Amino acid sequence: MADHVRINELLDYVKTGRIMDAMREFYADDVVMEEPMYGKTEGLAANLEREQQFVDSVAEFKNFQADRVASGDDFSLYENVMDWVGKDGKTYHVEQVVVAHWRDGKIVHERFYYDRG
């Protein structure tokens, strides 16, 4: 049911820098995440490790916007823009669309669409 798709709560976690908390709260143990840079990562433990590596590489988050959000009975999608400065000193800008499938209030599959360039 749609009330199990808690996308706005998840986005609030991310907007306030609670990315790892969001992973633990909103992702199923058997989640599969897919993105152009990394391919498929299966299981919550592997995704937590991958996400922690990302978080550890960030010196400063500058911007996270997700203004276009939609959801249905078992899916959510949003378009977002992120900007951050990495510990390597580079500035990063990503525009992406994220599509997630939910089961029992948790994400079981999430795919990120963005240009790798």
Image (tube, helix red, strand yellow):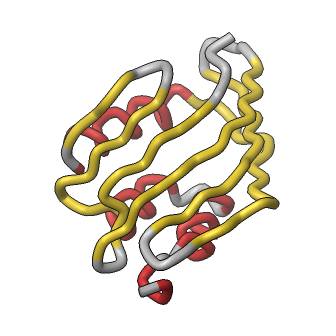
107 on left or right of 90: left
* Relative to 93, residue 27 above or below: below
Judge by depth and name the residue closer to the eye, 88 or 42: 42
User: Residue 47: x percent and y percent?
Assistant: 30, 41
39 on left or right of 16: left
* Relative to 80, residue 88 above or below: above
Q: What's the residue at 40%, 60% (across, down)?
A: 101
* Relative to 62, residue 37 above or below: above
Q: What's the residue at 22%, 39% (across, down)?
A: 42
7 on left or right of 81: left
Judge by depth and name the residue closer to the eye, 114 or 27: 114
**Quarter of the image where the C terminus is located:** top right
Q: Quadrant of residue 84?
A: top right
User: Residue 58: x percent and y percent?
Assistant: 59, 31
Judge by depth and name the residue closer to the eye, 67 or 21: 67
Q: What's the residue at 48%, 89% (across, down)?
A: 3
**Which residue is situated farthest in the front direction here?**
73
